Image: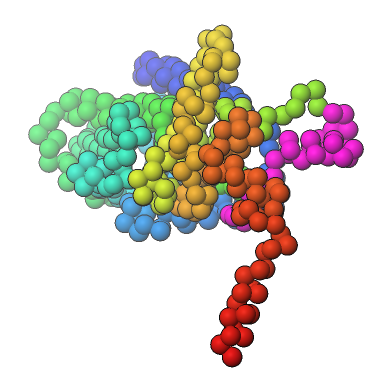
Amino acid sequence: MSILPQVIFLLVFAVAGYILFKRISFLRRNIFLGKRETRNDLPDQRWKTMLLVAFGQQKMFKKFTPAILHLMIYVAFVIINLEVLEFVIDGIFGTHRVFAPFLGSAYGVAMNIFEFLAVAVLVSCVAFLIRRNVMKVERFTKPELNGWPAMDANLILVIEIILMFAILTMNATDQILASRGVPHYTLLNGLFFSSFLQPIFQGMSDSTLVFIERFAWWFHIVGILAFAVYVTYSKHLHIFLAFPNTWYSNLKPKGEMKNMPEVTNEVNMMLGIATETSAEPPAEIGRFGAKDINDLSWVNVMNAYSCTECGRCTAECPANITGKKLSPRKIMMDVRDRAEEVGKSMDSSGPGLADGKSLLGDYISKEEINACTSCNACVEACPINIDPLSIILQMRRYVSMEESAAPAQWNAMFQNMETAFSPWKFPPSDRFNWSEKVKNEEIKEI
């Protein structure tokens, strides 16, 4: 038997592996353009959060219908990868259905389960295409999805449909060849779903069927490898990043705003107190807030790469609902786009972060971040615990503390907070004057 197919398979596998390695290295470097942040506390709670939210799809079920459809694709993705393992072994060693002799009748049962999941994926992907392109669900029609993001979502669904048809076609032709006693093919105890395709191929010759079966096999495994590479360029990177993203979730109460260590260190130095980070004063004062991606934490940048672009955050955002420019989904997409731009510039020996652009201004406007009510609706809505509010607050802090460019009403409030300890401009000693008026009115009534 010729070893040429095995050589070709190993070459394809090696090329895909190399591309994946390069892309993953690129993504890792981009994520760590963000500042250091340690989130290794409460490991038990973090494992529980990851298992419930990422693995268990807990937050998806706030919207039941898409949750069921997504669950079918998710389960199929996890389980059908077991069959991909068989594909890889067959490709390397030139075997065919290598697990069949070892599993006996259980192998046929497993193949029927895989076919059921393949059909479930087909149904779910068709339903998602209808929701996006026919029903036009409102959160899929926002301006930030125009162009490539919308095409990306549709393309991935079409690819999944084609790959599932490839599995069913391969099984249908495989079983016809096995029933004819063609060597190298194993007759199973009836594959239910692919049997509906068999009448299409029954009148074909053995050589034609072998060609179709082999073509479907190659198309599926090469398609899987290409899909794995494509995912790293797509919003579907959340398939992998959802797990670390949920593990590194912010476990603090949603209403708690994080203090700025730069401010804390400056105050400590003014008071002669040693800082937590170093006994030596820093050579350069840290930036207050965030202007570009290197001012955000690496967790913020990972959040951006993990974003599914599902739009649940934007659909729940009160600012967006009332017609404001803010879209939490766009915030995450902008952070990811800026990280990609900087990363590509660095790889081509370009200026990188010194390209004269910044996240705030060139990607995200002040109008957007000022519209945020800090209500945490976007954080609560996200199926994988992404935190757009953290990024918005850091950029607002930069505008207020570095540029002194907060809206006039905000500056008045800040001044009142500093001098009167409340948003209103009257001294603390007058804070309970209203109670005297109430008491006087009660006395008059008596």
Q: Residue at x 81, y 27 (%)?
A: 282
Q: Residue at x 33, y 28 (%)?
A: 148
From the top left corner, tell me how far across and down residue 75 is, in percent: 40, 49
From the top left corner, tell me how far across and down residue 346 is, in percent: 56, 14
Would you identify the image quadrant in which residue 273 lies?
top right
Q: How many marks?
A: 0
Query: Is the image coloured rainbow, by chain, by secondary structure, or in one colour?
Result: rainbow
Using residue 59 as the reference point, say whether residue 192 is left or right of it: left
Which region shows up in magenta?
Answer: 252-281
Quarter holding the C terminus is bottom right
Magenta-drawn stretch contains 151: no
From the top left corner, tell me how far across and down residue 440 is, in percent: 62, 80
Viewer-side residue, 369 vs 205: 369
Using residue 445 as the reference point, say whether residue 220 is left or right of it: left
Q: Residue at x 33, y 48 (%)?
A: 117
- Vertical relation: 238 (above or below) 250: above
Viewer-side residue, 98 vs 65: 65
Q: Is residue 88 visible?
A: no
Viewer-side residue, 374 vs 198: 374
Magenta-drawn stretch contains 253: yes
Viewer-side residue, 314 vs 71: 314
Using residue 55 as the reference point, say whether residue 159 is left or right of it: left
